[in-house]
Image (spheres, grey):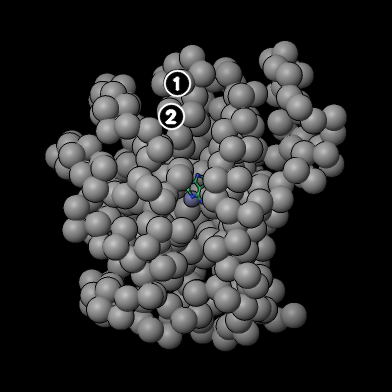
Amino acid sequence: PDRDALIARLPKAELHLHIEGSLEPEMLFALAARNGVEIPFASAEEVRAAYSFSNLQDFLDIYYQGMSVLLHEQDFYDLTWAYLERAKADNVRHVEIFFDPQGHTERGVAFETVLDGIERALKDGEARLGITYRLIMCFLRHLSEEEAFATLEQARPHLDRIHGVGLDSSEVGHPPSKFERVFAKARELGLHVTAHAGEEGPPEYVHEALDLLKVERLDHGNRALEDDALVERLVREGTTFTVCPLSNLRLCVIDRIEDSPVKRMLELGLKATVNADDPSYFGGYINDNYRAVAEGLDLSAEQIVELAENSFTGSFLPPDEQAAHL
Ligand code: ADE
Ligand code: ZN
């Protein structure tokens, strides 16, 4: 229908994409063979069948296991390049991608190997596909504050290549307050800051992300809607939410796509955006996510355009570059 054509041709930015979550089963197999890594699956079909999750932790266990095939600079290049080609097909003009260095350094892969491969693909994407980028380094929140500080130290020589920090992995039991000092240091170093908050965790975690981490946007943020005063504040402050509809569905954050908070957020005056999170695990790239909410929530053309515009105004691009996309 018209709506799908509109989604296909709308220029958009993707603000919530874990590059390790774009590892398709076919590439998982190819890299396992190339690197001589054993994986507990016989076929890509078998892998896809294993992608059935009841919550965030179920998914994370498989996601960290999938990373085991990523060893060399070229692996990180190939992973990132495949995502960028897919993004190009969806008319994505700007990406702000997350990477999880601790998922690799704890396996003995050097921080620089990860950064070099991802960045080389991002630079090629800018030159050959016209997709601009920002790179956001996430801290794994199930690990300690000390380990996050050590990761920030590893990033220190490369701060001209990393634009921001984020916070991901198991949310409940690991509140933003655990990383208050690390984020203060990151801000002092001139990095942008964002955090996953209110995906499974309570509204209190969203308050902490704002007040203690001083995040510039909220990744997911679904459960902020349970707190009216918080919603009022987020409307007033114009905070961008990076919502991930198919992720929410596959991780049982919502029961049905009709329960996605995207439309309610727009109606409340919140700056919602639509993103894929971990597309190879959740059954869809960015336009699949747009189509799912457009149909499930019966979004108007104006609302679809608003989501795409929010993706640029909520990005870390300078205002003149944001404006050039609107
Ligand atoms: N790591 C990758 N995807 C994630 C998500 N949706 N929530 C938390 N951590 C993640
Ligand atoms: Zn995420």
Dot 1 amino acid type: Thr
Residue at the spot 61% in from the left edge and 24% down from the top edge: 68
Cα–Cα gap, marks 2 and 1: 6 Å
* Mark 2 touches mark 1? (CB < 8 Å): yes
Residue at the spot 40% in from the left edge and 38% down from the top edge: 142
Viewer can see residue 76:
yes
Image spot of residue 114 (x, y percent): 48, 25
Mark 1, residue position: 105
Q: Is residue 139 left or right of residue 84?
A: left
Q: Secondary structure at mark 1?
A: helix
Q: Is residue 324 left or right of residue 307?
A: left
Q: Quadrant of residue 296?
A: bottom right
Name the foreground residue: 108 vs 83. Answer: 108
Image spot of residue 210 (x, y percent): 24, 59
Q: Given the current orientation, which residue lies at the most extreme front position?
A: 173
Dot 2 amino acid type: Pro
Image spot of residue 244 (x, y percent): 53, 61
Using the image, determine if residue 1 lies above or below residue 238: below
Mark 2, residue position: 101
Q: Residues within 10 Å of mark 2 (few under 14, many from 20)?
A: many
Using the image, determine if residue 196 lies above or below residue 143: below
Q: Is mark 1 within 8 Å of ligand 1?
A: no
